[in-house]
Amino acid sequence: MLEHVHHQVPVTALAFSGNDLIFAGEGNLLNAYDIETSQHRASLQVFRRQAIHGLIVDDTESPSIIIVWGGCLVRSLTWSLSGNDRVKLKPGPLFRTADWILDASLSAVAKEGGRKLLALVTAHNSLIVTDSVPLASRADSISDQDRLLVPLVPGSNCLLYCAHVTWRSPSHCLIACGTVFGNVIVWSVTLSYTETGSLVAGTHIHYSFPAHDGSVFGVQISSMLPKEMPGGHQRVLATCSDDRTIRVWDLSNLATSSPVDPSKQCSRTTGYSTIIGTEQCAPRCLAKTMGHMSRIWHIVSFGEDASTISWHLEHLSTLSDASTHFLQQFHFANMHAGKHIWSTAISSSGRIATGGSDGTIAIRSLSSRTEISLPLKISSLLLGSFNNADTFKAYSFIAASTLLATTTQGKLIALELLASQIPWISELASSLPGLCGYSVVTSVPGAGWAAGLDGKVYMYVHEHRRLTQVFDARRKITGLFAQRTGRNGAINLLVTGVGDIDPTMLLLTPGMAENINLMPVLQKAVRLAVIQGFVVTSFVVITTEKCYQVVLGSRKGDAVLYDIDTAVDQSVIQAHPLLQAHGKEAITSLHWVGSNESPANSSGLLHSTGRDGTHAVHHIQLAKGEWHAELVHSLALPFGPNIEGLTIHTDNHIWIWGFRGKDFVAYDINAQREIIAIECGGAHRNWAFQPEGEGGWFVWTGKAELYQQQQTQLSHKLLNSGGHGREIKALAISSTEYQIIATGAEDTNIKLWAFSTRAQDGFRCLQTLRKHNTGIQHLQWSRDGRYLFSSGGFEEFFVWRVRPGLPGVGHGVVCESTNPNSGSSDLRIMGFEVREDYSPNEAERASFEVYTAYSDSTLKCWSYEVGGRTWSLQWQGDYLTACLTDVFSPFTTTNEQWLATAATDGHLALWSSKHTVPKAADELRYTHRHKIHQNAILSVATISLPHDFTLVITGGDDNAIGITRLTTAGHMHTLLIPRAHAAAVTGLAVLKSSSSDGSFTFASAGIDQRVKLWRVTVDAGFSDVYGIEVECVKSTFTAVADVASVASYKLADGKAGVLVAGVGMDVWEVK
Amino acid sequence: MGKSSKDKRDAYYRLAKEQGWRARSAFKLLQLDEEFNLFEGVTRVRVGRAAWEDKRYKEKLRLRQADPAENSSALEDEGPPEATPRKDVKIVAIDLQPMSPLEGINCLKADITHPSTIPLLLKALDPDYNSTSSSTEASHPVDLVLSDGAPDVTGLHDLDIYVQSQLLWAALNLALCVLKPGGSFLAKIFRGKDVDLLYAQLKIVFEHVTVAKPRSSRASSVEAFIVCTNFRPPKGFKASLDDPLGAGRKLPTDAKAPRTQPSRRLRDDGITELELGSDPEEDDGEDIRWIAPFLACGDLSSFDADASHKLPDGHISLDPIQPPTAPPYRRALEERKKMGGAYGKTKLGALSERSADG
């Protein structure tokens, strides 16, 4: 049996209840979440095999009512609070309509009757009006006949993509709908009761007009607008379409009638029309905009003062102001991965929630944006130079909201930033000749340094408001880097100059007793020898018990280490090459996290960011006087390539910042979410960022002016961590005790996940691996879970080293090697098999045999040496012309000679995997070929049984599952279940076997959104397939569409589970 | 993707251009016909979607060759000279978009979901048809109805499948009005969730229902074709576009009627076929499910739509025969181009590649 555990699928419906709760339709489940704490409060399967498409929450009733619809089904539920903060959901009876429901609306209470009416519009423009009472009644009190809701107003034959229904009064419905052909129809229904108490409807078509050039995907009627609105529009209609425009129409006048006969609403013309007729029945078009990069799916709502929020389902959202007859982009957010936002809701308190195809629910405030201040220009006039000649030059934060800044005329000032106000400016020095025209600034908390052309380095200590000169380099200074080391207030300041001059490191320590202010004074200056062309771009000091070291990062991606022995008086210190990271791009920041585990050995993690768009971590160790650096983590960030800095923030979360196009972006790598995004014009400017709380201060220079912006709270809350932006194509679960789920998707990313049922959080994304340029085709873990292999298009094949439990980072991931053919052609590596050749004592020197199956029917065998990271092509063979879909070892014994391939021609082929002499493609062929399916084999699972045979289970595009008995001699016999699924069988996984009776179970899943459990018994006494019996023991609906893979997953307490991946992920327990 | 890389990626895209078909989908019909002999003895056809009437045109060639007595009269400018339409073959093609005309084919720009299309179609099939009479049943019914209609997919799988099923119902409703008893119906279908409900409905009005997948259709695509033969309307059934099937009206089904029986048999090819029978638990009340038998069409030796192919040396990438006539987003692209936006870089000509996608 299969029992549902958890799923993460597109969020297709959302509704707020008051200010505390939000209800979400995720597949066929209705979930409730607490908005403040993000906690999951309830879950109920509302439909058996239908996703939820819409929700209405009515809190005015007691108990509160939720109306849920999806497809042709409607159900009413009640909810109440029960103990321990749980929400209790009680389902009412299930009703069905004959047609797809596009929208629903609940009326207000009419005075006399006191009953609310539910209006439903269907995809053929029919209107169903039903009393809400029977909907909420007890399930057994309703006859089957009454469960079919019959239209009050019959529809037409043409199909709608969208509709919106609103109640103008308890007896008057207003409906807008959009057709496939770009027409919009606005009509209304007046309800009355006959003497017998049955409802009758009078219909009235107000407008029927060609609104768009393409299919209309969204329509939304506003509520009544306030009278003081400019233009005096009382009601507007917004529409959006395939033609990429949003249009707003004036619906103030509903007295008009369309001359079109209501019974032939669509008969104007059929098909797309270039002639625009019946202009007179079109409302006035108020505004039109092209705010979107691609197709627009929904117009969500109208808020206060006629603002519309239109969600654009690719990346953007716009809040538009329609009152002035043009749509102005007001807000822009990027909260979901991938392409689609499928649902939205607005709360009475002005929150907006969106549900994405990535399975995330994002909530933000709609109107007042208090969490981030507006960008504020700090005018250069504040510098007191009225001819506007002086401007801000270089600056750096010396305290949470205080900057030390230089000006082009050589002033040194302190800026106290204030939220949404002009900052306080205090002048520290009116004119320092060396800082005129050119200057650099750096800081540590509490102190800052400035230097310029003449080489004089000035230090400002904020606590004492004192400025001193600490050093004179006697030549132009190009860079200043500072770090506070140790608790005694010592500071290391690195000063770099032009030409082949070695950088100088200054040791500043608080002075002796006579210096009452304890101002740091220069203790020592040493020169750090650098090779020619080494331009310092980053600096970090590593202190250990005995000595301390300095690491410098260069513009060309090198890092060098200096051992500084304080006991020995050296003036020049030689560099030790330490590591190369970030390709040939600049290392922009270095951050040291020491390890306290072994005081004898100096070791720790060195974080770095670079302009190659990555964050890297090296494990650094001092052993026998030698420093060793090992790359333990290196991943590209979802922005860049200019990654500029890193900090370890509260809760040990690592924040990394840099630029994405014109935006400055900060990202939390542990939470896998964006923290801040500020439009500043791009990376090529002076800027400073001070992380704080849920954001921080960002100051930047744009067009010779200074700007400031502060974020105090996250712009939006994510109720659950999101998944892939597009459908998952490959799935692999590590066979280690602590299982890591790896998924590869059409969005070209690989994600590593942990799954937990206890923490309510379900899937937690550990890392996102961004390197592939195409959708992922296949993933496989090494047996010990240390390596993950991935393949995609363009012959991309990557070897990833995964290190669980890397302090700070969580899971360290490094792409250790790429197959030398990666990117060499447009062939896809459809599948691969990795065989391991570990010698137990020399794990690091192991090698992998990698068999790759290509879309042009070739099969290649590579040997990958882990130690040297080298590849050699062992042999290759040509199958036929059919695309290979998979390659696998049918027998689990490592020394087995057989290798099997599956292809789009439905055949299984056997190859001999042992070739001592390298062979070219045309020399090598399969040795056995066996037909199973009519066309493509899309999934394969194997189980080795005693008596030297294996069962190969195959799922086909032909709906069939084949069970092929393969002997070590290469004989194959097949038992085929032709109608195993109603559509292609895309996932198979062997779950458990019992050696006692020779039976085992396997799970299958397909595009028909069914998961099936099969029991197979094998009597090995029979030859061929006579001894094989198959039984389907369970068939159930999965909310995951486009299933691409199924895998066996061990749930907590060792229970057997199945994981289904496609558009989302779904976990089942096998009982 | 550029033209050349698409040539490599998709053998049928290249072949369509080389052999002069308007779209690669022509091969889908050729391969379906290889298996089902859809055009044998067929004289009256109705086609939905533009790309296929070209196919039909070539198909007539085959019909004509089978009938040497036919008078091959003049056809001067385009096409093979022997491709003259046979007098007793009537083809009507319907598409939403304007179509480039084809000799011998009556092309209609209409919406198959719309009731007013029926009189248009009947008129096109039979010039004597009087649209004022209320009858929507053809006086000269047709042998074969083909539909290759597909919606703009949204990405919301439920909705895409629903809209596609609505197109299938629309084509079937038209077919029910014009199809001869014993006639055939062929339509594109998305093999997704609940497709077994559709199969069960079709099985009521046709003796044989098979879901067929031509090799020219990619295995990675949900697209397949439902081939229904021997039309046998239930007693008392009257087709009507005023009360069409699909949106509400369903064909009455008998839940107890035998569907697929459990069996285990050894096939000639050595494979043991295990039929487990229909599971009544799969049904939703009166919604009966049935999985139609699957048949892959086209020779295994024919090109594989999923495979990458090596292009011969000196291969020249050809332009598609017929670019799309008027995509709805054309104006948006033009606007964006004017604004110099990202889409401005997209050549409108690049759109033409979509035509060969179908």
Image (tube, coloured by chain):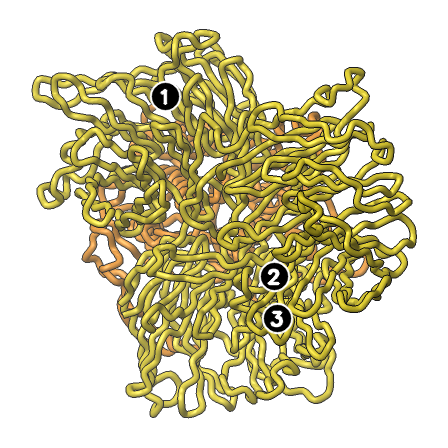
Chain colours: A yellow, B orange
Regarding residue B34, the answer to whether it shows in the image is no
Task: Describe the element under mark 1 as helix, strand or loop.
Answer: helix
Task: Classify residue A811 by image quadrant.
Answer: bottom right
Q: Label 2: which residue?
A: A593
Q: Residue at x 47, y 16 (%)?
A: A249
Instruction: Please name which of the two marks, 3 or 2, marks the residue nearer to the observer.
Output: 2
> In terms of sequence position, does the residue under pointer 1 or pointer 2 come before the other?
1
Q: Chain of mark 1?
A: A
Q: Label 1: which residue?
A: A264
Q: Label 3: which residue?
A: A853
Report the Cα–Cα distance between label 3 and label 1: 57 Å
**Badge 3 amino acid:** Ala
Image: A1069 above or below A128: below
Q: Chain of mark 2?
A: A
Instruction: Please name which of the two marks, 1 or 2, marks the residue nearer to the observer.
Output: 2
Q: Residue at x 31, y 46 (%)?
A: A31
In the image shown, does A773 or A191 lie closer to the viewer?
Answer: A773
Image: A888 above or below B95: below
